[in-house]
Amino acid sequence: MLNNAMIAVGALMLAAPALGQSSLGEPVTIGTTYTIPSAVLGGERRITVRLPLGYVEQPEMRFPVVYVIDGGPEQDFPHIAGIVQSRDMNYSFGRFILVGVETVNRRAEISPPVRADALADYTESLGATPGGAAEFRRFLAQDVKPWVEQAYRTSGQDAVMGESLAGLFIIETLFEQPDLFDDWIAVSPSLWWDNMKLAIAAPARLRQAAGGKERLYLTLANEGYRHEEGVERMVDALRSDAPDDWQWAYVPLGRSETHGTIYHTAALDAFRLLYGTTTREYRPASEMLGREAAPRTAAEQAMLDTECTAQNTTALTPESAAMGRDRLFYRCLNLDLGPVAREGNLGE
């Protein structure tokens, strides 16, 4: 059987000083870590899973899966899981299974190869020999995804996300093995890597890309230098050469985020853009209005009783909704929350 350990955040309870006693708090569980065998990498590896609200209570439901690279319990899984849990409070995006895939030596495991004359310099500066990305992709395809799909009720809609070097891995995987995932979230990808090789090759790679309904969320912090140039080269290639059935968005966050702070903002924005849900504007009560609230009309009740569909849902921003709020009561709305994409067609 697989070993598993609960990831928990202990609730600290302070003992009364006069009693001189301490007591254990009740842990808050945010996911479960499993040790699985890996035929590709050899030995065992850890993945961490958070199931969506209602997973047990709704056995007929199947859910998309979002895989987080660098998703170990001491890596990015806990803080991304917190963002996912926020959905259970605000319903701003749909439910999905979150799977964190731990990296052990990330600089070696998820990096593309580099040119021969630069290998020694990269190895010295990274403290690891780069070039393991292809093998890590095989690990995802042959070990991780089959385990998850056998263990859980997955829908077949899969996403992968990562930041920095993991973001570079996302872009490279999109080019090398686009059928591995459907949705791609690349946060400040290190497209400066190896003299911007992947960014420079992007136009040709996109023109050669097979058809498929890929969706890409791309963002960048206040990076500068070739980090920014590489991403802009990728955006330029998407603008001119992306396949017609691809959807993508470039959401630059350089005015407000650094490389170290971007992940939270970007992850929440990506989840809302990729998995956004319909909402409604309700007429508030008299006390909030400052006047007597009008009774709900028959037409308004009919709108409220009608299921929201793509045909009867209006897309707009919270700012524009505020300007026309009185005309939007009970209508189906698709709000563009968070930062606004600079360009792309994702969400159209």
Image: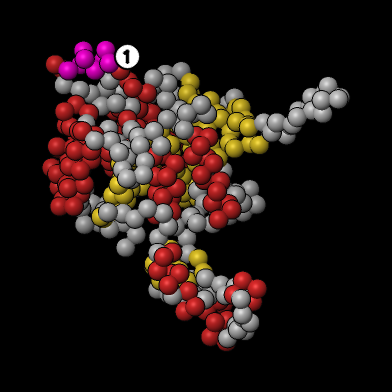
Vertical relation: 242 (above or below) 167: below
Vertical relation: 305 (above or below) 202: below
Looking at the rendered image, the quarter that the C terminus falls into is bottom left
Q: Please provide percent x and percent y for residue 179.
A: 31, 43
Q: Is residue 257 left or right of residue 198?
A: right
The residue shown at (33%, 22%) is: 107
The residue shown at (63%, 32%) is: 9
Element on which disc 1 rests: loop
- The colour style of the image is secondary structure
Which span of residues is magenta-colored? 118-125
The residue shown at (27%, 16%) is: 125
Q: Please provide percent x and percent y for residue 140.
A: 39, 32
Q: Please provide percent x and percent y for residue 248.
A: 28, 52
> Could you tell me what secondary structure mostly forms the magenta stretch?
helix
Q: Residue lying at the far right in this picture: please name it.
A: 19
Q: Nearer the viewer, residue 114 or 37?
A: 114
Vertical relation: 300 (above or below) 3: below
Q: Nearer the viewer, residue 269 or 214?
A: 269
**Which residue is label 1 attached to?**
127
Which three-letter amino acid code belongs to the residue tagged 1?
Answer: Gly
Q: Is residue 318 left or right of residue 164?
A: right
Q: Please provide percent x and percent y for residue 274.
A: 39, 53
Vertical relation: 255 (above or below) 330: above
